[in-house]
Image: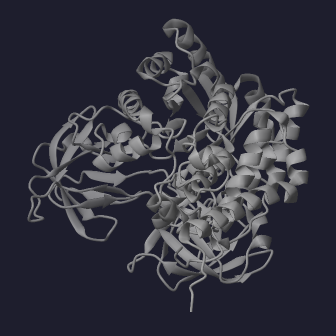
Amino acid sequence: MTDVSPPPDRWLLETLQALRTTLGRIEVEEEACLEAIHPEYGDSARNLLHFIAFHRHAHPGLPKALRQRGLCALTDCDPHLLSSLEAVITALEALEGLGPSAQAAPPSVFQGQPGPGQLQHHCDRLFGALAAAGVAGIMVTLPAEAAERPALIADLLEAGMTIARINCAHDDPVVWGRMVDGLTQARLATGRPCAIAMDLAGPKLRTGQLALQPAVIRVRPPRDRMGRPSQPVRILAVPPGAMPPPPDTEAVLVPVRLSKAKRLKAGDRLRGRDASGRRRILTVVRSGPDGVLLQADQTCRFRSGLVFRQRHRKARLRVGPLAPVSGERLLRPGDAIRLTPEPDQGGGTLPCTLPEVFGDLRLGERVLFDDGRIGGVIRGVSAQEVVLEVTTAQAKGSRLRSDKGINFPDSDLRTPALTAKDIEDLAFVTQHADMISYSFVHRDSDIQTLRQCLEERGRGDLAVVLKIETRQAFLNLPRLLLAAMGHGAPVGVMIARGDLAIECGWEALAPIQEEILRICAAAHVPCIWATEVLDTLAQHGHPTRAEITDAAMGARADAVMLNKGPNITATVKVLEAIVARSASDRSDRSHPLLTCLAFRSNCVTDEPLP
C-alpha cells in the first residue's frame, strides 16, 4: 500500500499557514478591543494579540522542527511576530519549490520590522532623555535620609541613578517635597537628568496591631565554638530617660532605678532573678555619674520591675520602666486562628487591616503570612471573620507580629487598587512626578479609575507603570496592557518580584519573570526589573554571586530598580557597570524553553511534530 502522508516540510508549511490564519482571526475577534486602542499603540496592541494567539495554538515542538530545517525558530521574534512568521513561510515555500520565491534567497526575518523601533520609541516617551539605546536605566528608592541630606542624592546621580523612586507608603508630603527639592538641586549641580517615579501605596492587606506586651532586653555573653561563654557581657545601668553613650561599644544600655548606688564599688555583686525566673549575678565594674557598669557571666533577660539587690550594703537596682513592644502570635501547624476586623482580642484571633476582602474568599483557598513564612488554608468564611488552619510553620512555632503582609494567592480579590489615601496623595504626585507606579493593579477597571483621577487633575498625560505583584495581575497582564493602551499616555510595567514570588511560588518566579519580559516585548512596553536586586550589597557592602547574576539577567529589561540600603551609592556604581556590560543582551528577552505560561494550557497537543 502506497504511503500518501504529506512530506514533513509540507506538513510544517501547512501548520505555519494555519497559524498565520489564526493571527488574522484574532484581529477580527478582538475588533472592538483594537478600536478602543489609542493610535499611539495601534501596532503594539495588534502584535500583542498576535503573540497571544500564536502561543495559544502553536505546537510546543514547533521551534525544534524549524531549527531542524535551518529556519528561524520564532522564539525571539515576539516584538514582530506576524512579519517574522511571514518570512519563515516564504523561506519554507522556497525550500518546497512553491511560487515565484522558489529561486529567491530567504529574506531576513528582521528586515523592516517595526518592533524594536516601537519599543525604543515607548522607552523614550516613558523615560524621556534618560532612555539610552541599549542601556538599562537605574531606578533607586530614595531613603528618608535623602530628605535631610541633598548631598546623598547628588552622589546617587553621579553614581548612575537615572530614576529616583519615592515610595508614598512611607513618610508624608513634607518629606517627599524635601526629596524633590534635593533632587532638583542635585540635577542642577551635576548636570545629570533624572526622572521622578512616585509609588502609590495601594491597599495594605496586613496583620493589624496586636496587643502590646512587656519589653524584654536580652544580654548574652560571647561564646566560643563549643558554646561556652568566652568573656562576660557588659551592661550599662542608667536612670530612665538618660541616654549617655556607652563607655565601650559592647555595653548594653538598660534603664534602671538605683537605690543607694553610691555605696557600690568595683567587685560588688547584685543578685536577683531575670525575666526567665533564673537566678543571676551582676558584678559591678565601676560606678560613676553616668551610671553603673555591670557585667554578667550568663545570659540575662531584663523586663520592667525586676529587682537585683546587694546583700550587705542594701543597694538595690530596679529595672524599668521599659516601653511595651508590639505583640506577637506563636503559630504551629494545626492551629486554628480567626481573622477578624476587630482590634486584637488575644487568644486564637488575628486582626486584619482589610476585612473588605472577606467576601471574596472561598473554602480551601490558601493564605500566606509574612512573606510566606507561615501558611494556612481557609476552613470557614463569613463577612465578620475567616477561620484558618495553619498548615505551614516551624514545628516549635513561628512568630507572627503586627503589620506583616497577608497574601491570598488562590482568591479572586475585587479590592480596588486605588485607595482613599492614594487619591489624597495624587494631589502631590501629579504636581511633581514624571511617572506613577501603580501598586496592586489587577483589573481593567483599576486602570480606568486611575486615568479618570489623573484627567480630573489635568494630568491625563502622566505616565503610569503597572506593578505586577500578584498572581491575578500576572494572569491578566495582556488585558491590563490593552486597557492601558486605550490612552495615549506612556505606560510601563514593573516586575515586583517580592509579592509575586509569594503568590505564585518561589519555584515559579524564574519562568514567570521571563514570561513578563516576553509579554512586554510583544507589546513594545518598557519593563522594569525590581525587588531585592543587589540587596546584600546595598545592605552589607558585599554582593553574593547569585545576585550579581540576577542583576545581569535583569539588565535585559529597560530599567532595574534598587531598594535603599546603607551602601546604596556603591551599589548603583556596581549596577551601572553590570548593565553597561550586559547592554548587548537587552534585545533578547526570550528563552527557547518557554512556552508562554499564561496561555500554555490552550495549546492543542503535546504530540511531537513529524
Residue 364: image x %, image y %? 65, 83
Number of marks drawn: 0
Q: How is the image coloured?
A: one colour
Task: Specify the quadrant of the image occupied by residue 363.
Answer: bottom right
User: Where residue 9 sits: x, y (%)?
Assistant: 56, 65
Residue 395 shown left or right of residue 286 in the figure: right
Of residues 257 and 171, the one nearer the viewer is 171
Task: In the rendered view, tell whether residue 6 sits above or below residue 62.
Answer: below
Q: Nearer the viewer, residue 215 or 95?
A: 95
Residue 404 visible: no
What residue do we see at 85% from left, 46% from top? 448
Work out whether residue 531 can be spotted: yes
Q: Position of residue 566 (x, y in %)?
A: 38, 33
Left or right relative to 602: residue 528: left
Which residue corresponds to the image point at 68% horizontal and 45% vertical from the top-left? 523
Above or below: residue 384 compared with residue 141: below
Which of these two is toward me, 299 or 441?
441
Q: Quadrant of residue 596?
A: bottom right
Front residue (pair 100, 202): 100
**In the image, is 579 to the left or to the right of 45?**
left
Q: In the rendered view, does 441 fall on the left or right side of 288?
A: right
Q: Considering only vertical position in the picture, is 368 above or below 574?
A: below
Q: Position of residue 437 (x, y in %)?
A: 67, 39
For the N terminus, the quadrant is bottom right
